[in-house]
Each structure stands twice: as structure tokens, then as C-alpha cells.
Amino acid sequence: MTPPSAAQLRRLIYISSATHDFGQADLDQILARSRTNNTARGLTGMLLFHDSCFFQVLEGEAASVERTFATISRDTRHGGVILLESKSVAERGFPQWSMGYVGAHALHPAQRQWLVDLSARVCSDNPKPLSEVAGINVHVEAFLSSFREFA
């Protein structure tokens, strides 16, 4: 498989809420399937599950990222799917992870607070796209960079 050029490389970030209680076995099943599918599709990224909310980053060829996100959006295990970002990027943030997973127990207090703050900004009656939240790009990049220690 030919890696996507920088012009084709897309990063998509979304959050959603779980529609039912998820145990570790449920998460393990999602991760196993995601890793298999993402490897076949040339996708990389990370998943964070905290307080019944999913935060996911998908990276790869634009069409593959968009198809995968469309599938996720229709998945009945996800409710209130909110697209936070979808943009072209020069390089992958998680090139070694077909689907990295970070559990809530591994979050630093600052990372946990960032998620709480993000949820408050976008999980409201009138969610704003990240592009409309002043200075959010810097915060998103810093937040994503903080997970490279896990990779």
C-alpha cells in the first residue's frame, strides 16, 4: 500500500457518548476490531474512553478516514457524535498505533481536566465546531502531543 501524500493525509477527531455501560470486555472487543480494520485501511489513531465518553483520533487517507467516521456515526453504541476536527495534516500524530487506547486511569490530572473543559464547550445544546472556539487549535495540539508518551 502506498502511504498517502501530505495533501491526502487527514486527521479527524470526534467525541461521542456511550449508549450503554461499557465494561473492559466491551472495550477490548471494539479495540480488537478497530485494530484489524484500521490496519487493512491504512488508518492510525487513538481512542480514549472516560466517564462514558469516547474521544477518538483517526488519521490516514482522507476517503478511508471519512468512510470509517461514517460507519462510527451510524454505530448504535455511540450517541451524540460530535465532529471536533477534520483537516489535512502534514504527518500522523500516532504512526505506530493502528488504534492506541488510553484508559481513564492513565490520564494525568491536566489531561482529565482538558477533557472536562472540552466536553463543556462542545457537549451543550448549541455545540460549536472547534474552529469557532478561540485558541482551541493550540490546546488540541498540546492535548494530542501529551499522548505521544503512551505510543
Image: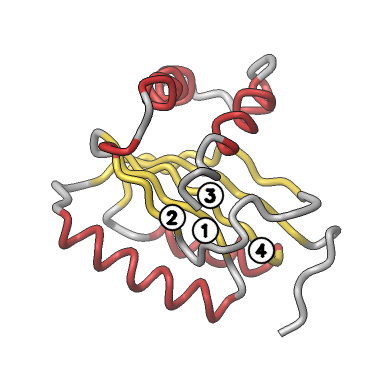
Which residue in the protein does label 3 denote? 57
Of labels 1 and 3, earlier in sequence is: 3
Spatial CA distance of label 4 from label 2 is 18 Å
Of labels 4 and 2, earlier in sequence is: 4
The type of residue carrying mark 4 is Gly
In this rendering, the label closer to the viewer, 1 or 3: 3
Spatial CA distance of label 1 from label 3 is 10 Å
Relative to residue 142, is residue 37 drawn left or right?
A: left
**Disc 2 crowd, CA 10 A, few/some/many (<14, 14-19, 20+):** some
The type of residue carrying mark 2 is Ser
Tally of numbered tags = 4
The type of residue carrying mark 3 is Val
Q: Tag 1, which secondary structure?
A: helix
Spatial CA distance of label 3 from label 2 is 14 Å
Q: Position of residue 117 (x, y in %)?
A: 44, 17
Is the residue 4 above or below the residue 75 in the image?
Answer: below
Of labels 4 and 1, earlier in sequence is: 4
Of labels 3 and 2, earlier in sequence is: 3
Q: Tag 4, which secondary structure?
A: strand
Residue positioned most to the front: 149
The residue lying at 60 percent from left, 30 percent from top is 140
The quarter of the image holding the N terminus is: bottom right
Which residue in the protein does label 1 denote? 69
The type of residue carrying mark 1 is Phe
In this rendering, the label closer to the viewer, 4 or 1: 4
The residue lying at 78 percent from left, 70 percent from top is 4
Spatial CA distance of label 4 from label 3 is 10 Å
Which mark is on residue 60? 4
The residue lying at 14 percent from left, 52 percent from top is 23
**Disc 1 crowd, CA 10 A, few/some/many (<14, 14-19, 20+):** some
Q: Tag 2, which secondary structure?
A: helix
